[in-house]
Amino acid sequence: MTDQTMEIDLSSGSREQIRERLRDWLNVDAPISDAALMAVMNHRGYATKLGAMRNHANAVMHLLDHPPAIPAHLLPSAPTHSSRELMAKAGGSLVRWMRDGARQVDSETRDRRWQACMSCPQLADPPQNLAYAAASLISAEKKICRLCGCNVRAKGRFPHETCPSEDTDRPGYSRWGELLDIDAHKSGM
Ligand code: SF4
């Protein structure tokens, strides 16, 4: 996916490839810190400001040196999710869903969540392992959320599930447009 605002692909490749792409795009020789990279990927206002200052080297360097803070629990960590963790997560989510009476959200909520996930920089292809077997039972879609490791098609259908990423344009709300449930994500649900 290409971010329409920045006209730069921030969602494909490794973190180092994205970092290099960003350096080229901004015409900077200096290294880009993890904090600045994460802020670009998670804070639309910051990314837009950087894009607007692209031809002003001093302003770009100032922005890169002073990225906004992104809460640690919102930073991508999927590459470190172990297969065991992911299997436990998918299985746990199914158990909660069944305990909930196997209810699903209404179609409007499901579609709103799906659209948000499909345009989210945290959307990723799943690792090639068996950790998604449980999620695959209920969804042919394989894309996952980098932040929580969940299969987004399945996740978006479950009433108990939440999006872990804050909408930077609407503090306190997730990218799904729902109240951000910080406690749930701190406790790994
Ligand atoms: S659940 Fe939230 S953070 Fe994860 S892919 Fe969907 S919109 Fe993005």
Image (tube, rainbow, N blue to C red):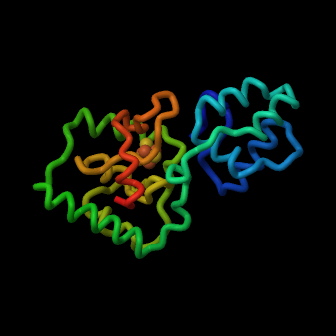
Q: Residue at x 49, y 41 (%)?
A: 120
Image position of 67 with respect to 84: above or below: above
Instruction: Work out which quarter of the rendered image holds the C terminus and state it.
Output: bottom left
Judged left or right of residue 128, residue 36 is right
Q: Nearer the viewer, residue 99 or 184?
A: 184
Image position of 70 with respect to 97: above or below: above
Q: Residue at x 26, y 64 (%)?
A: 137
User: x, y percentage for residue 162?
Assistant: 34, 47
For the view shown, which residue lies furthest in the top direction? Answer: 52
For the view shown, which residue lies furthest in the left direction? Answer: 101
Q: Nearer the viewer, residue 82 or 46?
A: 46
Image position of 95 with respect to 178: above or below: below
User: x, y percentage for residue 143?
Assistant: 43, 54
User: x, y percentage for residue 80?
Assistant: 54, 67
For the view shown, which residue lies furthest in the front direction? Answer: 183
Instruction: Work out which quarter of the rendered image holds the N terminus and state it.
Output: top right
Q: Residue at x 81, y 34 (%)?
A: 62
Q: How many marks?
A: 0
Residue 174 lies in what quarter of the image?
top left
Judged left or right of residue 182, residue 168 is right
Residue 138 lies in what quarter of the image?
bottom left
Image position of 135 with respect to 67: above or below: below
User: x, y percentage for residue 7?
Assistant: 67, 32
